[in-house]
C-alpha cells in the first residue's frame, strides 16, 4: 500500500488524494520525458528503442531519469554512456541504482566548487557532449606508477642542476635517524557522534640507518653547508639553502613565525621537489581522476569480490550495498580519487585488514602547507592531494576528515567531510543488514553534534546543489526508509513546484506542504522549495502548522527532533527575511503564532516583541527569558547552555536601540543575575559569560 494508515489521515481530499497525486506526477513525467527526447533529437541524438523501453517499463526508473532534474538530458545520456561502457547486464539488471547515481551526479558537472559541486570547472564537459556512440566495452585498467627514473649520471649528456641535487642525496652515506612510533588506540564515539577522550598513544623510538632524503637536508645546518659546497663544486654556486638547524624536521609540529626563515625553507622545498619530479623520483603531477564508467567499473569489481577475513576484521561492519537506492549513493559516486590511489588502499584492506580512518595530528605546522610538505620531503609514488601523502605528512582535523571520508568511499560506503565550528569531521551512510534501514551518521565530531554539522558533499537533489546541514542528508536516509517511491515522487514534485509561477507558489504553499508531509514526511527537498517561495508571514505560519499537524497525526512528531526544528527554523528564517506585517493586529497574531510554534529565532522574536509591545514589551520578554535561563538546571550542567543564551542576548541587542536605551536594557537584565553571577559546572566555579557581556553593555 502506497500510504500508511497514519499518513492517510492527513489528506483533506480523502481516498482520492493518492490518485490525484499520482496523476499529477504522471503528467509531470510525461511532459519531462517529451522535453528530454525533443532536446536529444535537437542535438541529433537517437537512442535505441530497447534502451528507452527499458527505462519507461519501470515507473520509478523513468521518474528518476526524466523528472528529477530540470534539465534531464545529461542524466539520460550519462546512463546510456554507462551502458555502452559496462554492458546491459550491469546497468539494466545488476547495478541499476548505482548507474542512476552516477548519471544523476554527473549531470551536475559544470558547477564550480563555490556553487557546491564536486567537480572542478576544468574537469567538466558540456552536458550534451556525452559520447553515446557505439563502442567496445570498457576494460578496467588500473594505471601504473608513471614515474620514469632518470639516470642522473648519464655520461652521454651534460648533467644539469637537478642531476647534481639527486646525486648528492642518493650518493650520500646513509645516516642514522631516530623515528618515533606512535600506536594510537582507535577512536570511539558517544551517541551524538562526538569522539570520546582516548588513552595516550604508546610511544617508542626506533633507530634506523637509511639513505639521505631532502627533508634531512632541510632539517640539518651541517647537511645544508655540505650541500651548498657540493653544488658550488659542480658548477652551481647560485644554489644555496639556509634553513637553520632543526627549524623544520621530520617530527616538527610548531608553525614557523619568522617570515624570512619560512621563505628560505619554502624555497628549499621547491628546489628539492622540482628535482625529484624532474628526475622521476616523484610523479610530475597527480594521476587523473577516473571517468564515471571507470569509477563504476572499479566499484562493481570490488563488490563482486568475496569478502576476505582480513577485510571483514578491518572494516568491522558489513559492506554498504551498492544496490541501495540511488539517493543514498550520491556521496559515493562523487568520489574522484584516481584509481591507482584507491587500489593501493583497497588492496591493503583486502589483504591486510588495514582500515585507517585517522592519521598523524601535527598541530600548528599543518596550517602552513609549504612547511608541512618540507618536513618530510622524500621520493614518493604519489603526489600531493593523495590520501597516501596525507598519511605520510599528517595534518589536523581537515586532513583527518579527508582520510576518513576517502577511506570509507574506497571501501564502498558513501561518505564526505563535514564542517563544524572550528573543526572538520566526516559523515558516513550506513546500512543495518538486520533491519534493512539506512542512516547518515557522523564521526570524528568534536565541537558539537549533528545540529552544528554541515556536510561538504553537494546537496544534489534539487537544481541548485551546494552544501547543506547534516539533517538534510539524514532526511534522505529517513525518506528512503519510509518510502522510496514517495521520495522520488517528491523530487518530481519539487521540479513541478519550481516550474509554477511565482503567484501560484506564493498562494499554494500550505496545501502543497500538507501533500508533501502526507506523501513522505521526510521529503525535505520538496518542503524547502515550498518554504522559500512563500510570500508572507501568515502563509508561512500555515505552512509550518500543516507540517507539524502531519507529523503529529503520523505519530512522527518526536521521531527526529532535529528534523522538526530544522523545518520550523527554516520557516521562521523566511518570515524574518520578509517585510513586517502591515497592521498592529497582524503583528500581535504573528507573535502569538511564533510563540505557539516554539520559535527560537532570536532576532525575529526581538523584532516582534518590539513591534507588538514597544520598548517596554521588548524588555519584559527579555527579562522573562533571562528568568527562565536562570531557573534552568542545564545552566550548571554544561557551558553550552550559557553559550546558547549568550548568542540570544547578542541577537536581542540589535533591537535594544543605541546609547542610553541599550545601557538601560542591559542594566535591567543584569539586575536579574544578582547573586547568580557565577556558574558551577562539575564543581568548578566560573563567571557566567552572559554577565560579562551585559556588564560591558551596561558600562559597569
Image: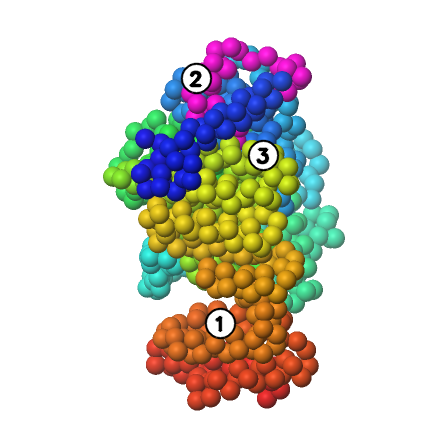
Which label sits in the foreground, 1 or 3? 1
Q: CA distance from mark 2 to mark 3?
A: 26 Å
Which residue has dot 1 on it?
645
Q: Which residue lies at the image location 41% right of the left edge and 50% below the top edge?
A: 549
Residue 73, position in %: x, y? Answer: 59, 24
Q: CA distance from mark 2 to mark 1?
A: 56 Å
Quarter occupied by residue 247: bottom right
Mark 2 vs 1, N-terminal side: 2
Whether residue 257 sits left or right of residue 589 in the image: it is right
Residue 199, position in %: x, y? Answer: 32, 64
Which residue has dot 3 on it?
108
Colour mapping used in the image:
rainbow
Is disc 1 surrounded by few (<14), some (14 to 19) or many (20+) residues within 10 Å?
A: some
Of 84 and 263, nearer the camera is 84
Whether residue 232 sits left or right of residue 425 in the image: it is right
Mark 1 vs 3, N-terminal side: 3
- The magenta segment: 39-68
Q: Disc 2 vs disc 3: Cβ atoms closer than 8 Å? A: no
Q: Main secondary structure of the magenta part?
A: helix
Q: Which residue lies at the image location 74% right of the left edge and 53% below the top edge?
A: 238
Residue 341, position in %: x, y? Answer: 48, 37
Is residue 484 visible to us here? no
Circle 1 SS class: helix
Q: Which residue lies at the image location 69% right of the left edge and 44% below the top edge?
A: 161
Is disc 3 surrounded by few (<14), some (14 to 19) or many (20+) residues within 10 Å?
A: many
Which residue has dot 2 on it?
57
Q: CA distance from mark 1 to mark 3?
A: 40 Å
| Quadrant in which the N terminus is drawn | top left
Amino acid at each position: 500500500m502506497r500510504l500508511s494508515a497514519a499518513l492517510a489521515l492527513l489528506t483533506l481530499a480523502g481516498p482520492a488524494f493518492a490518485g490525484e497525486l499520482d496523476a499529477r506526477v504522471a503528467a509531470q513525467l510525461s511532459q519531462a520525458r517529451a522535453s528530454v527526447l525533443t532536446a536529444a533529437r535537437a542535438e541529433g541524438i537517437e537512442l535505441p528503442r530497447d534502451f528507452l523501453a527499458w527505462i519507461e517499463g519501470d515507473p520509478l526508473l523513468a521518474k528518476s531519469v526524466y523528472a528529477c532534474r530540470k534539465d534531464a538530458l545529461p542524466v539520460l545520456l550519462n546512463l546510456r554512456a554507462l551502458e555502452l561502457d559496462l554492458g546491459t547486464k550491469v546497468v539494466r539488471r545488476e547495478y541499476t541504482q548505482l548507474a542512476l547515481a552516477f548519471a544523476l551526479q554527473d549531470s551536475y558537472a559544470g558547477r564550480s566548487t563555490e556553487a557546491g559541486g564536486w567537480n572542478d570547472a576544468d574537469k567538466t564537459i558540456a552536458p550534451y557532449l556525452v559520447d553515446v556512440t557505439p563502442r567496445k566495452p570498457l576494460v578496467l585498467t588500473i594505471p601504473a606508477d608513471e614515474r620514469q627514473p632518470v639516470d642522473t649520471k648519464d655520461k652521454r649528456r651534460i648533467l644539469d642542476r637537478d642531476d647534481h641535487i639527486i646525486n648528492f642525496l642518493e650518493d650520500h652515506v646513509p645516516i642514522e635517524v631516530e623515528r618515533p612510533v606512535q600506536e594510537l588506540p582507535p577512536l570511539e564515539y558517544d551517541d551524538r557522534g562526538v569522539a570520546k577522550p582516548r588513552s595516550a598513544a604508546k610511544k617508542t623510538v626506533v633507530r634506523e640507518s637509511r639513505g639521505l632524503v631532502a627533508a634531512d637536508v632541510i632539517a640539518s645546518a651541517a647537511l645544508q653547508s655540505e650541500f651548498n659546497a657540493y653544488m658550488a663544486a659542480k658548477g652551481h654556486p647560485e644554489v644555496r639553502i639556509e634553513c637553520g638547524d632543526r627549524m623544520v624536521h621530520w617530527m616538527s609540529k610548531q608553525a614557523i613565525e619568522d617570515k624570512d626563515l619560512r621563505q628560505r625553507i619554502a624555497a628549499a622545498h621547491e628546489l628539492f621537489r622540482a628535482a625529484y619530479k624532474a628526475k622521476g623520483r616523484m610523479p610530475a603531477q597527480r594521476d587523473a581522476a577516473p571517468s564515471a564508467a571507470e569509477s563504476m567499473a572499479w566499484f562493481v569489481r570490488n563488490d563482486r569480490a568475496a569478502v576476505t577475513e582480513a577485510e571483514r576484521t578491518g572494516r568491522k561492519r558489513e559492506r554498504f550495498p551498492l544496490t541501495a537506492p540511488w539517493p543514498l549513493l550520491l556521496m559515493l559516486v562523487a568520489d574522484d580519487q584516481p584509481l591507482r590511489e584507491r587500489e593501493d588502499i583497497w588492496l591493503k584492506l583486502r589483504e591486510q585488514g588495514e582500515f585507517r580512518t585517522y592519521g598523524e595530528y601535527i598541530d600548528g605546522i599543518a596550517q602552513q602547507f609549504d612547511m608541512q610538505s618540507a618536513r618530510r620531503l622524500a621520493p614518493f609514488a604519489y603526489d600531493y592531494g593523495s590520501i597516501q601523502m596525507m598519511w605520510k605528512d599528517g595534518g589536523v582535523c581537515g586532513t583527518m576528515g579527508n582520510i576518513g571520508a576517502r577511506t570509507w568511499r574506497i571501501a564502498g560506503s558513501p561518505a564526505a567531510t563535514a564542517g563544524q565550528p572550528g573543526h572538520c569531521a566526516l559523515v558516513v551512510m550506513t546500512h543495518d543488514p538486520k533491519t534493512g534501514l539506512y542512516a547518515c551518521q557522523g564521526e570524528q565530531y568534536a565541537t558539537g553534534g549533528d545540529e552544528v554539522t554541515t556536510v561538504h558533499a553537494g546537496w544534489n537533489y534539487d537544481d541548485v546543489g551546494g552544501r547543506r546541514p547534516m539533517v538534510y542528508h539524514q532526511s534522505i536516509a529517513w525518506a528512503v526508509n519510509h518510502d522510496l517511491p514517495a521520495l522520488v515522487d517528491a523530487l518530481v514534485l519539487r521540479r513541478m513546484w519550481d516550474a509554477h509561477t511565482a503567484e501560484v507558489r506564493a498562494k499554494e504553499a500550505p496545501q502543497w506542504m500538507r501533500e508533501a508531509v502526507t506523501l513522505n514526511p521526510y521529503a525535505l527537498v520538496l518542503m524547502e522549495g515550498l518554504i522559500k517561495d512563500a510570500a508572507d508571514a501568515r502563509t508561512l505560519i500555515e505552512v509550518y502548522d500543516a507540517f507539524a499537524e502531519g507529523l503529529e497525526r503520523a505519530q512522527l512528531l518526536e521521531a527526529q527532533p532535529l528534523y522538526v526544528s530544522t523545518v520550523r527554523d527554516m520557516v521562521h528564517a523566511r518570515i524574518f527575511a520578509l517585510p513586517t506585517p502591515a497592521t498592529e493586529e497582524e503583528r500581535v497574531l504573528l507573535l502569538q503564532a511564533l510563540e505557539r510554534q516554539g520559535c527560537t529565532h532570536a532576532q525575529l522574536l526581538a523584532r516582534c516583541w518590539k513591534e507588538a509591545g514597544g520598548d517596554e514589551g521588548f524588555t519584559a520578554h527579555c527579562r522573562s527569558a533571562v528568568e527562565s535561563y536562570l531557573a534552568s538546571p542545564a545552566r550548571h550542567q554544561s557551558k553550552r547552555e550559557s553559550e546558547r543564551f549568550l548568542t540570544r542576548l547578542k541577537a536581542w541587542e540589535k533591537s535594544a536601540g543605541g546609547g542610553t536605551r541599550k545601557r538601560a536594557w542591559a542594566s535591567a537584565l543584569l539586575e536579574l543575575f544578582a547573586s547568580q553571577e557565577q556558574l558551577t559546572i562539575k564543581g568548578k566555579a566560573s563567571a557566567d559569560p552572559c554577565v560579562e557581556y551585559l556588564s560591558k553593555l551596561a558600562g559597569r
